[in-house]
Image: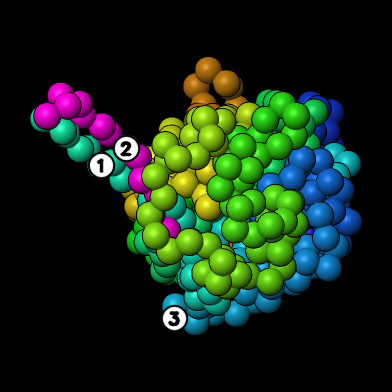
């Protein structure tokens, strides 16, 4: 197919897709997205380290992502890649997510590891079991997925699942850039009055600052101040206020769905929590993630309307580096690793016969 014919096909598909109600597309963040990302950051409600309400810092993150995509990753380097979720019909950006290739490269990555100690006094006939928090760097060298946030009013129609799982197809498409183990550090529990119980019960005593200030400082300047000021000795959880104890390992109410999606993908909670808000850190091996393990590489054989009864509801990605993009749509599986692609999906991703795609069941 000639370039002009291909462009005409895609343009006609786009018209038909728009008539069916438009679509959502995941793509890599670009400098022109900074204002939209800043507006998103104002809606997080705080405690969202990977989406700080600071234009300069957001610009640094986006520019670092763009720079990292344009070059081969150096061995052991720590790179950040930012994705955005956009409405294809309007071009509006209403969601974002990130990936980090290596933690602990620029500065150590701190967590609390929870262990359990049991003690018995036979003379008193009493036994005591205590959870103990240990400050550790166990995830240095791991990769991380994070920064997942959507406009609250648009968390429907599978949009959150789309951008969350697109990260894993990006990982699969750039596997050599990522470590064997990957984590997700979820935002912790915030009380109805806006306070952060874990921080109020522990961190405030050592940093003498508001949670938002400590979180922002960590985002902008790194976490050496944690090593400087945080106690090095284990902390018995029972010494914390009850509200702080109850917050340990509990996700933010806006992150409960994200927690479920991570569990479905293969992440597991293994007793690690965030040092600021006590939110759960979940862990998986990258090659065991469902989208990485189960994805397929196929060639587009053609584009035509597909019957929802006989076709596959799929997450589809195309392109590498800055050209990476992903969307949800319908595929018909053909022999010899070929697929037929539905018209709206082809329009959304700019697909034409002969192109290679990654896909996994949505």
Mark 2 to mark 3 CA distance (whole Å): 41 Å
Residue at x 74%, y 45% (from the top left corner): 46
Closer to the camera, 135 or 99?
135
Q: Which mark is residue 117?
A: 1
> Of discs 1 and 3, which sits in the foreground?
1
Q: Quadrant of the N terminus?
A: bottom right
Q: Secondary structure at mark 1?
A: strand
Would you say residue 105 sits in the magenta stretch? no
Q: Badge 1: how crowded within 10 Å, few (<14), some, or many (20+)?
A: few
Sequence-first tag of 1 and 3: 3
State whether the magenta stretch is mostly helix, strand or loop.
strand
Can residue 2 be seen by looking at this rendering?
no
Q: Residue at x 85, y 39 (%)?
A: 89
Q: Tell me the residue at 55%/71% (across/down).
A: 228
Confirm or deny contact between disc 1 and disc 2 (CB under 8 A): yes
Give the residues drawn in magenta, as a range: 123-135
Q: Which residue is mark 3?
A: 75
Find out whether residue 131 is within the magenta segment.
yes
- Residue 182 place in picture, x, y as percent: 42, 55
Q: Residues within 10 Å of mark 3 (few under 14, many from 20)?
A: few
Q: Earlier in the sequence, mark 2 or mark 3?
A: 3
Residue placed under numbered mark 2 in the picture: 130
Q: Position of residue 105 (x, y in %)?
A: 50, 75
Mark 1 or mark 2: which comes first in sequence? 1
């Amino acid at each position: 197919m000639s370039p002009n014919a291909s462009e005409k096909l895609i343009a006609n598909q786009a018209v038909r897709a728009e008539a069916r109600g438009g679509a959502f597309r995941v793509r890599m963040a670009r400098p022109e997205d900074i204002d939209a990302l800043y507006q998103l950051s104002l809606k997080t409600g705080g405690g969202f380290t990977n989406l700080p309400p600071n234009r300069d810092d957001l610009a640094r993150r986006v520019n670092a992502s763009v720079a990292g995509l344009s070059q081969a990753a150096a061995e052991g380097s720590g790179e950040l890649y930012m994705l955005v979720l956009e409405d294809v019909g309007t071009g509006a950006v209403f969601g974002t997510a990130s990936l980090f290739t290596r933690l602990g490269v620029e500065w150590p990555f701190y967590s609390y590891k929870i262990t359990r100690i049991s003690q018995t006094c036979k003379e008193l006939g009493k036994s005591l079991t205590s959870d103990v928090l240990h400050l550790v760097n166990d995830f240095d060298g791991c990769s991380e997925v994070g920064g997942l946030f959507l406009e609250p009013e648009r968390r429907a129609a599978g949009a959150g699942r789309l951008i969350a799982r697109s990260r894993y197809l990006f990982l699969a498409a750039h596997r050599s850039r990522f470590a064997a183990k990957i984590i997700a550090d979820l935002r912790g529990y915030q009380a109805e009055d806006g306070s952060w119980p874990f921080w109020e019960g522990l961190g405030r005593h050592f940093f003498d600052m508001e949670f938002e200030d400590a979180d922002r400082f960590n985002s902008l300047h790194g976490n050496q101040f944690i090593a400087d000021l945080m106690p090095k000795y284990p902390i018995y959880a029972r010494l914390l206020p009850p509200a702080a104890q109850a917050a340990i390992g509990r996700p933010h109410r806006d992150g409960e769905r994200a927690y479920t999606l991570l569990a479905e993908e293969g992440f597991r909670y293994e007793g690690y929590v965030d040092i600021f808000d006590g939110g759960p850190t979940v862990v998986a091996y990258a090659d065991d993630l469902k989208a990485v393990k189960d994805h397929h590489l196929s060639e587009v054989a053609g584009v035509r309307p597909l019957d929802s009864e006989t076709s596959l509801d799929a997450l589809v990605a195309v392109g590498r580096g800055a050209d990476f993009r992903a969307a949800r749509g319908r595929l018909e599986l053909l022999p010899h690793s070929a697929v037929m692609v539905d018209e709206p999906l082809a329009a959304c991703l700019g697909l034409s016969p002969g192109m290679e795609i990654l896909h996994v069941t949505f």
